[in-house]
Image: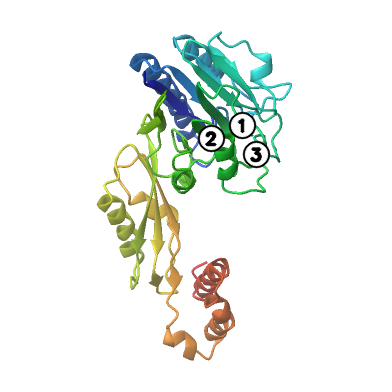
């Protein structure tokens, strides 16, 4: 029999979305709840055998009553077990929802740092896991351990970091996962997991986050449907990414090289968003790149107004002044002196130093031109 499991995590319910407008922030909080409910409805309607939540279901310890009611309602509607491994954002300390709230009987929550397991005899499955009990978890809880019932399907549900052996968010080296010997590792913590999952091929996978919350989580997001089968011939696992979120954060670049008029820059930003096919369900950041006239004053807020047909638009000015501006190099006055003083930093190998120097040059030229 093939077992179907819905694997999600890093939902971060009650995220404030403080980087967005006061009007948009509450809408996005509601959309995050709707995305979670859509996952649970999919689990109910498609007959999955189990739901696994790999930590950080909440953004912090202050969980709203609205969110608690949502969980009780959605979990109660499932006929399958739900297993939760609390992470660093929703750790199982003495005041957490995992300790003080009464959740439906089908919900199993790990509440101890030591590795333990929940047996599901009717499914022939043991789910291993642990909990963060504080914000930091400095050790790997798997060392020297093996599943107790190797003939059953053994799944590790874990919130941790496979990319750093010195992580304070529970280091889980891939070698330790292999040595533990679970049939599959359902992991949480890394929101953009493509690179991490490459290193875990055949061992398990991160589910990523089901909905992006800022531009650091851009692109398509999803939960993972796991199909797992085990018999005398071995273990067979397949996974499928399933999207539930309505809105997505998107990023694109607009090359402004050679542009000398502000309106041309703003139109380039709008054109880049349009050419990338961004629409009404996208929150868009356009990065202005390239070398432009150093006297050009770009207002990112004004530039964002040119981008139409999207849910939200933001522009980042990452252009740099044109370094081969001969008129500045030859200028014998204050402008030339400012340019020559900043030139070593403008040509620095450090991107942050180049960016700071470029902005300093732009502001200085604008001030000398009486534009500030």
Indicate which disc, 3 or 1, sits on the residue closer to the N terminus. 1
Q: Could you say which disc has been placed on residue 265 in the image?
A: none
| Label 3 Cα neighbours within 10 Å, binned few <14 / some 14-19 / many ≥20 | many
Q: Nearer the viewer, residue 63 or 372?
A: 63
Indicate which disc, 3 or 2, sits on the residue closer to the N terminus. 3
The residue located at (59%, 35%) in the rendering is 180
x and y, in percent, of residue 226 in the image: 40, 28
* Residue at disc 1, secondary structure: loop
Q: How far apart are the alpha carbons under marks 1 and 2?
A: 8 Å
- Identify the image quadrant of residue 16: top right
| Label 2 Cα neighbours within 10 Å, binned few <14 / some 14-19 / many ≥20 | many
Q: Nearer the viewer, residue 95 or 134?
A: 134
x and y, in percent, of residue 79 in the image: 44, 9
Residue beneath disc 3: 170
* Residue at disc 2, secondary structure: strand
Quadrant where the N terminus is found in the figure? top left
The residue located at (42%, 24%) in the rendering is 232
Indicate which disc, 1 or 2, sits on the residue closer to the N terminus. 1
Q: Could you say which disc has been placed on residue 87 in the image?
A: 1
| Label 1 Cα neighbours within 10 Å, binned few <14 / some 14-19 / many ≥20 | many
């Amino acid at each position: 029999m093939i077992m179907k499991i819905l694997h999600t995590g890093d939902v971060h319910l009650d995220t404030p979305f403080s980087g967005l407008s006061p009007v948009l922030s509450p809408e996005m909080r509601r959309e995050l709840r709707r995305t979670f409910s859509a996952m649970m409805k999919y689990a109910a309607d498609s007959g999955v055998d189990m739901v696994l939540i790999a930590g950080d279901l909440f953004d912090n310890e202050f969980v709203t009553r609205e969110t608690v009611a949502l969980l009780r309602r959605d979990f109660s509607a499932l006929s399958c077990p739900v297993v939760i491994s609390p992470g660093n954002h929703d750790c199982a300390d003495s005041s957490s929802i995992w300790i003080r709230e009464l959740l439906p009987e089908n919900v199993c929550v790990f509440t101890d740092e030591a590795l333990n397991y929940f047996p599901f005899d009717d499914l022939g499955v043991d789910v291993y896991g642990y909990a963060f009990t504080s914000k930091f978890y400095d050790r790997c809880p798997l060392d020297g351990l093996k599943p107790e019932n190797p003939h059953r399907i053994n799944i590790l549900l874990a919130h941790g970091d496979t990319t750093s052996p010195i992580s304070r968010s529970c280091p889980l080296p891939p070698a330790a996962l292999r040595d533990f010997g679970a049939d599959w590792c359902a992991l949480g913590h890394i929101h953009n997991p493509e690179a991490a999952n490459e290193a875990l091929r055949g061992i398990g996978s991160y589910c990523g986050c089901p909905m992006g919350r800022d531009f650091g989580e851009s692109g398509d997001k999803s939960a993972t449907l796991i199909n797992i089968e085990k018999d005398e011939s071995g273990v067979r696992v397949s996974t499928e990414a399933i999207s539930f979120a309505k809105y997505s954060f998107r990023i694109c670049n607009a090359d402004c090289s050679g542009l000398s008029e502000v309106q041309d820059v703003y139109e380039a930003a709008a054109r880049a968003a349009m050419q990338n096919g961004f629409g009404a369900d996208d929150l868009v950041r356009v990065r202005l790149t390239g070398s432009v006239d150093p006297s050009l004053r770009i207002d990112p807020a004004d530039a964002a107004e040119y981008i139409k047909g999207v849910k939200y638009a933001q522009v980042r000015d990452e252009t740099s002044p044109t370094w081969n501006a001969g008129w500045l190099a030859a200028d014998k006055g204050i402008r030339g002196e400012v340019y020559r003083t900043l030139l070593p930093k403008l040509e620095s190998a450090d991107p942050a130093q180049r960016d700071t120097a470029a902005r300093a040059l732009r502001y200085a030229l604008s001030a000398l031109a009486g534009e500030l």
